[in-house]
Image: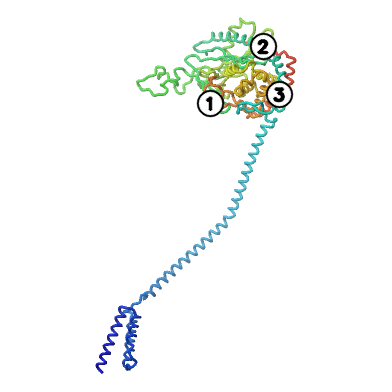
Amino acid sequence: MRRLWLGRRRNYKTLTSSIGQRLVGGSREEAWCDLCLSLSFPRKAPAMALGLFRVCLVVVTAIINHPLLFPRENATVPENEEEIIRKMQAHQEKLQLEQLRLEEEVARLAAEKEALEPVAEEGQQQNESRVAWDLWSTLCMILFLVIEVWRQDHQDGPSPECLGGDEDELPGLQGAPLRGLTLPNKATLDHFYERCIRGATADAARTREFVEGFVDDLLEALRSLCNRDTDMEVEDFIGVDSMYENWQVDKPLLCNLFVPFMPPEPFHFHPELWCSSRSVPLDRQGYGQIKVVRADEDTRGCICGKTKLGEDMLCLLHGKNNLLQPGREVKDPLCARDSPYLDTMQVMKWFQMALTRAWHRIAHKYEFDLAFGQLETPGSLKIKFRSGKFMPFNLIPVIQCDDSDLYFVSYLAREPSGGTPASSTDWLLSFAVYERHFLRMTSKALPEGACHLSCLQIASFLLSKQSRLTGPSGLGNYHLKTALLHLLLARRAADWKAGQLDARLQELLCFVEKSLLEKKLHHFFIGNRKVPEAMGLPEAVRRAEPLNLFRPFVLQRRLYRKTVDSFYEMLKNAPALINEYSVHIPSDHASLPQKAVIL
């Protein structure tokens, strides 16, 4: 019995140790399963064994549930949960505060938006009204410009265009007749020219010969009275304008003579063209100034004026003692006050006094008197014969521009540009010599008996008669000649045959009409690069901006209206005037003006 008890005790110890190892090394479930399997003994076991089993089961259960043997992994969860809850509560409080702040910000922005909406709407309305006003102003300006252009082109009739041409820049070379007005036919024009114009200019050669002989004698006397050391040196005269271009028609015949002069030594002239400066006003284009300098003061052509000489070098032409000092006044009587530039008024006074002394020197040789025709133009002279007839001519003092055929004139009986000099030091640049050379060169290339001068003579005759009826206007013979020069450059030589007189005359008048309506007639030489290079025109003048001879019409509307009305009245009266003068040629000798000053 004891042996049986000891055996079972050993079995229980073995089972207990096995279960303990399972619990230590394995899991609770495995230990519990081993226990159940090990205790599956027969039901015949005594009650002691059952009690012992219950005790062991309690012990095993206590061991299994002991916290030191099997520590729980989530034993610290309660403490961490409290900390997390605290953090979550603090974070929630922050979120609530941030939400309150954002709600306040949204409310403020909404209030500002509501406050700005009326201002924005008002600004948008103002912008819309401003845009509408700007658009309306632009449309009004465009409409005004269109109406102005239409008025300029059509208020005096349809835009005139003439027979075809070859130069695109020239206005009015294609289209219909002049404002519905017609000129006499070719037969009537030929008859008028032969009886009225050609006969009236038959004695032009004798007039030129007489005037040239007298002027030669007068200038020779003037030279004999001048002091070569102090007075101006007068050169030979040059014949210009209609009398020397063979298209003079007005009576009495008028000779225009240029008289070049030079300063005494050691002075000489330095012309300054308007196109050499960029700051010249538009109304001063075509003018220039003449600077009087001493020969030893002019270093422009010497190397000493362009380089710095050393202390041991000296220019033999321009020494240090001869250089121009700043502020030094040129001691010349014909210069403007406190200025080195030549004065036109001083030149006029000098020339008038010189002519008076020269005439007194030779007056005993002639059986006529010499008088000044106009006091404001000292070179306008009249030879008064004892029979009561007179012969006018103009002596115009001029200064040659360098070595060209350009001349600065102190005055003209009527300036082509229609303006007056703004300063007494402004000299008008004359192209009269170039114009005479161009007409002479062109005539050689035209057919024999060309009608170009005949057209100019008839147009000049009509303008002269109209001026006597309605008074002078802004249109002169110089404008007619300029229009003819443009047509000569544009037309072929074959178009100027004698049989096309009527067509070319209508084209000339049409060209003038279109230029008047556009208020634009460009100078023939200034800025015209189509002029043949054989003319020898200075390059500075060729490359200058074109000069509009009708620019005064833009500013003087009354003069423009009078000129346009006078032109159309001339066209209207042309047929009757030509027919009248073709039948009866009146004696057109003018009388001596009442205000003539005897020298």
Which one is earlier in the sequence, the residue at label 2 or at label 3? Answer: 2
Q: Amino acid at mark 1?
A: Arg
Name the element at disc 3.
helix
| Residue that carries the numbered disc 1 in the rendered image | 543
Mark 2 crowdedness (10 Å alpha carbons): few <14, some 14-19, many ≥20: few
Tell me if residue 323 comes above or below residue 157 in the rendering: above
Which of the 4 quarters of the picture holds residue 354?
Answer: top right
Task: Give the x, y percent position of residue 407.
Answer: 55, 18
Q: Amino acid at mark 3?
A: Leu
In the picture, the quarter occupied by the N terminus is bottom left
Measure the alpha-carbon separation of dots 2 and 1.
41 Å
Give the total number of marks visible in the rendering: 3
| Residue that carries the numbered disc 2 in the rendered image | 202
Task: Give the x, y percent position of residue 151.
Answer: 67, 33
Mark number for residue 571? 3
From this viewpoint, which residue is outermost toward the front? 42
Name the element at disc 2.
loop
Q: Amino acid at mark 2?
A: Ala
